[in-house]
Amino acid sequence: MADDFSRDRPHIHLRNNGVREPYRRPKQKIEPPAVPERDRAGHAAALIQAIGQAIQTARVQIAARDLNLAVGLPGFYLDIELPVRERVALDQLADRRQKMEVVAVHEPVGEGGPLRASVFVPQQAENYYLRKVEAYRDSDTKKGRPRNEPLVSRIETMRLATARSLYTDDDALFPQQPTEQVWWEIWLRKGRRENFERIAQALDLTLRTHAVKFPEREVMLALASVATLDRLVAHSDVVAELRRAKDTPSFFMGLGGAEQRDWSDELLERVTPASIPWSLPPRASC
């Protein structure tokens, strides 16, 4: 078929053959995922104990902060475990109104392992999960179900997170010695680069000057030990994920802006949606 205009997508051609119809809701009933069956009192008691211990440890951590290092919103990271079949709860762990954010998700290690999510919790929202669990234990909905059941019943446990909790790369690449200096990809939360560079200078980290920007993340390379990264996590709200730096990212981050765009376009053409990690935004801009 001859075209009277230029098209750069020859495999897609719709012209004057569409029919407009009003939207009709599908007749089938969409059922929400079933929640796990729990011993309500026992599950609530176990979670309250775990959350209470995490909060107490976080308070000690915040109180011990070095004021010359601390940057950003005071708070802490929680490491939350879910059964792998309950990943639907990931979207319920955060609360933007409370400035809480799910920063990293860890797929199970081995068959039957838990799904883990790392969540940043501002100090002002430290009792957020505790209140959810107490309401689950003590009150019912109008339908007679435990309040907050879709979230609370899907949580196995939680604990205060460390730098290891934010590590989303191959476990075999994680340093065995806490003082070993290695190069890391530091995946920063949106808008935190300036604070990261400030605390990195205070911690005497060696940084590469180039960064890769995504819509919700910015990636920088840093030479540091695990012990130093633990101090970084305890004194700031800047980190989303940690990965070991490899040859390809190091090369990529050494390119200029225009070269990065060319490389990112070429690389994105080679991947499929299934090959992109959960936390990796769909497209980069430099």
Image (tube, rainbow, N blue to C red):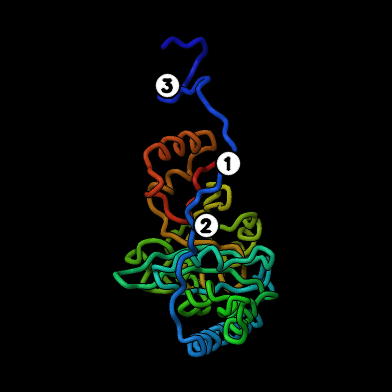
The crowd level at tag 1 (other Cα within 10 Å; few <14, some 14-19, many 20+) is few
Residue 204's disc number:
none
Can residue 167 be seen? no
The residue at which mark 2 appears reads as 187
Q: Are marks 1 and 3 in contact (CB under 8 Å)?
A: no
Rendered position, 42 above or below 104? below
Q: Which mark is residue 23?
A: 1
Residue 149 seen = yes
**Alpha carbon of mark 1 to alpha carbon of mark 2: how far?**
41 Å
- Report the amino acid beneath label 2: Trp
For the residues marked 1 and 3, what is the alpha-carbon distance in whole angstroms?
29 Å
Location of residue 55 with respect to 2 vertically, above or below: below
Q: Which residue is mark 3?
A: 10
* Badge 3 density bin: few <14, some 14–19, many ≥20, Cα 10 Å: few
Q: How many angstroms separate mark 2 from mark 3 (CA)?
A: 38 Å
Residue 9 picture location, percent across and down? 45, 24
* Residue 121 x %, y %: 61, 71
Question: Going from the N terminus, do you reach mark 1 or mark 2 first?
Answer: 1
**Residue at horizontal 38 percent and vertical 53 percent from the top:** 246
First in sequence: mark 2 vs mark 3: 3
Q: Total marks drawn? A: 3
Q: Amino acid at mark 1?
A: Tyr
Camera-nearest label, 1 or 2: 1
| Mark toward the viewer: 1 or 3 | 1
